């Protein structure tokens, strides 16, 4: 009994040492990975631009590419007020997804929309400049503001026209569908009759 007990104690001691070594190795590997990742971030700050809650990385980079002013404001807000930053990011999600889809479906309309959104910032800045200036500087600012407003109106009109054309096309297709259904009135009624009398009901 005593040799067996001694053998068991030796095995338990070896197992404990093995578990300790395994745990230390695991922790060292994790630490090396963390240090390596930190080094990559320091070498390439762009890797740190992960999408915030509410915006994917692609959506965040989309804002950076097409709305640099808004992106800069978001970055400042991220550092100063993270909670408000997350709220703004969630608010932007729907608009950014709509624009990304438009870019794929209608590139020409997408470009008009991008120009119109960018011009909004210009109009706001010029409005502030008019309010804060006097004399010749104010007159120049007013002239620039009127030109920007004219351009903004034309861009918005293009977007409204495109929206109207899309709705009109849908209405035309619906009207054609209704007319075709009316022309097939007797045929559809007979088909429905046959369906009801030969197999379970099917929507018509």
Image (spheres, rainbow, N blue to C red):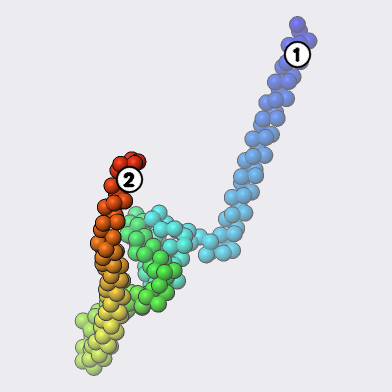
Give the image quarter of residue 133: bottom left
Say which of 200 and 149 sits in front: 200
Say which of 131 and 182 sits in front: 182
Residue in the picture at 62% in, 40% down: 27
Which residue is situated farthest in the right direction here? 3
Label 2, secondary structure: give it: helix
Say which of 105 and 137 sits in front: 105
Rendered position, 203 above or below 77: above
Mark 2 — residue?
195
Residue in the picture at 65% in, 37% down: 24
Q: Where is residue 195 in the image (x, y as percent from the top left)?
A: 32, 45
Label annotation for residue 6: 1
Quarter containing the N terminus? top right
Label 1 with label 2: CB-CB less than 8 Å: no
Which residue is situated farthest in the top direction here? 1
Rendered position, 201 above or below 88: above
Say which of 192 and 33 sits in front: 192
Res. 163 visible in picture: no
Label annotation for residue 113: none
Q: Where is residue 62 in the image (x, y as percent from the top left)?
A: 44, 67
Give the image quarter of residue 144: bottom left
Label 1, secondary structure: give it: helix
80 sits left or right of 141 in the view: right
Residue in the picture at 47% in, 60% down: 57
Residue in the picture at 21% in, 81% down: 131
Res. 7 visible in picture: yes
Q: Position of residue 143 (x, y in %)?
A: 25, 90
Which mark is first along the chain, 2 or 1? 1
Q: How far apart are marks 1 and 2 (CA)?
A: 85 Å
Rendered position, 197 above or below 120: above
Q: For the residues carrying marks 1 and 2, which lies nearer the camera in this image?
A: 2
Mark 2: few/some/many CA within 10 Å (<14, 14-19, 20+): some
């Amino acid at each position: 009994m005593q040799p067996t007990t001694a053998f068991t104690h030796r095995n338990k001691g070896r197992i404990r040492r093995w578990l300790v070594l395994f745990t230390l190795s695991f922790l060292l590997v994790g630490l090396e990975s963390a240090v390596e990742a930190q080094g990559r971030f320091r070498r390439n700050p762009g890797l740190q631009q992960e999408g915030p809650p509410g915006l994917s990385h692609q959506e965040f980079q989309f804002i950076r590419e097409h709305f640099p002013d808004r992106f800069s404001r978001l970055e400042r807000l991220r550092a100063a007020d993270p909670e408000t930053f997350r709220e703004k990011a969630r608010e932007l999600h729907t608009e950014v997804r709509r624009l990304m889809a438009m870019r794929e479906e209608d590139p020409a309309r997408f470009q008009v929309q991008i120009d119109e959104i960018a011009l909004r910032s210009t109009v706001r800045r010029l409005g502030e400049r008019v309010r804060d200036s006097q004399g010749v500087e104010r007159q120049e600012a007013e002239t620039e503001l009127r030109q920007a407003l004219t351009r903004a109106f034309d861009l918005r009109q293009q977007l409204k026209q495109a929206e109207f054309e899309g709705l009109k096309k849908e209405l035309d297709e619906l009207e054609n569908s209704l007319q075709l259904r009316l022309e097939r009135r007797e045929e559809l009624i007979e088909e429905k009759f046959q369906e009801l009398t030969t197999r379970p009901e099917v929507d018509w």
